[in-house]
Amino acid sequence: MKIVVTIQHPAHVHFFKNAVRQLSEHHQVTVFVREKDVATELLEGYGIPYETLAGPTNSFLELAYTQLIYESRLLRRAREIEPDVMAAIAEPGVAHVATVVGSTGLIFTDTEHATLQNKLAFPFCDAVYTPTCYRNEIGEKQIRYSGYHELAYLHPDRFEPNPDVLADIDAREDESLVVMRLVSWDAAHDVGNSGFDRTQEVVSRLERTGARVLLTSESPLPNSLEQHRIDISPCQIHDLMYYSELFVGESPTMATESAVLGTPAIYASSIELGYVTELSEQYGLIFEYNGADRQSKSIEKALEILRNTSAQTWERKRERLLSEKVDTTEYMIQEITKHE
């Protein structure tokens, strides 16, 4: 069986990495990438062969032009490979090219507000896989499953935390660690949205509890915050999140990653998503703040968690979640190989 997988974001590397490895044992799998942030660094770190079809972009207009180049190159390569299945996360290019070359186009998505991408991709693909908590009804192509994208790589059957990361950041044995994530807001589906407006205040308030704040950011940081930036391999971020006491940030993906690892997460963003709300309301592993007062409420909740809760509280919540959700990689492989 010939399978094409495309990557447009670092999170896509995590999502597909285990499926690519497992499928490659019995099938021909080709991975194409459009460079963004640390996507290629992650692929190399995980030992996954790939071919770059387009470089990074710095604006929405540049993204539109790059997408045209990307799709034309993907079409050329797909005609050479003649894949049985092409799979991606919310990627119009895969849906378009799969239609042209007669391949089965499978789209995975969990992002309701990616309206432009969804409108360009859904009409042309063969199936759209969404978590059961996805808020939108797509139609007859939609297939719901009881899982999250993040469980493709952080399910206990797929992830074993490595404590070496603590030595790499010179963490003390009794040190309280908080991972904080800032996003750039330049993705097409992020335009017009926002998260924290006074990052220094958040960091300072957290530090007053004695916690060490470790920043990861898609954009340059001011000098006052640069000292907090994490200096580790991108492949180690989930190890660090597992051993941290709290996650605070603007990224719904990283908030969910923390949650499924059993680390409580505070998500501050004007963007609302079905999977974040489910993890908040049903499992109590994410605290979601979307309103104008999201910064003050996030700080208040973060201080409460750091002062008053134990790891056992969150582990019990995580165990309940895992008992009700599937290994997303196993499900993905099952769906892809249906088309053999």
Image (spheres, rainbow, N blue to C red):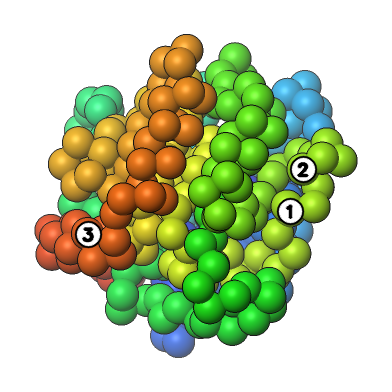
- Image marks 3 and 1: residues in contact by CB distance under 8 Å: no
Residue 313 drawn at (x, y percent):
22, 59
Q: Is residue 27 left or right of residue 260?
A: right
Give the CA distance from mark 1 to mark 2. Answer: 7 Å
Q: Are marks 1 and 2 in contact (CB under 8 Å)?
A: yes
Q: Residues within 10 Å of mark 2 (few under 14, many from 20)?
A: some
Looking at the rendered structure, the kind of residue marked 3 is Thr
Label 3, label 2: how far apart the Cα atoms are: 31 Å
Q: Are marks 3 and 2 in contact (CB under 8 Å)?
A: no
Q: Amino acid at mark 1?
A: Arg
Q: Could you classify mark 3 by the number of other residues whose Cα lies within 10 Å: few (under 14), some (14-19), or many (20 or more)?
A: few
Which residue in the structure is indicated by mark 2?
A: 225
Q: Secondary structure at mark 2?
A: helix
Q: Position of residue 96 (x, y in %)?
A: 53, 38
Q: For the residue marked with disc 2, what is the amino acid?
A: Leu
- Residue at 59 percent across and 15 percent down: it is 192
Mark 3 / mark 2, whichever is N-terminal: 2
Residue 313 disc label: 3
The residue carrying pointer 1 sits among few (fewer than 14), some (14 to 19) or many (20 or more) residues within 10 Å by Cα, namely some
Spot the residue most to the right: 223
- Asked if residue 232 shows in the view, the reply is yes
Q: Which residue is mark 1?
A: 229
Which quadrant holds the C terminus? bottom left
Which of pointers 3 and 1 lies earlier in the amino acid sequence?
A: 1
Q: Is residue 2 above or below residue 126?
A: below
Which image quadrant for residue 245?
bottom left
How far is mark 3 from mark 1, CA to CA? 29 Å
Left or right of 235, for residue 141: left
Q: 68 or 235, which is in the foreground?
A: 235
Residue 123 percent location from the top left of the image? 39, 29
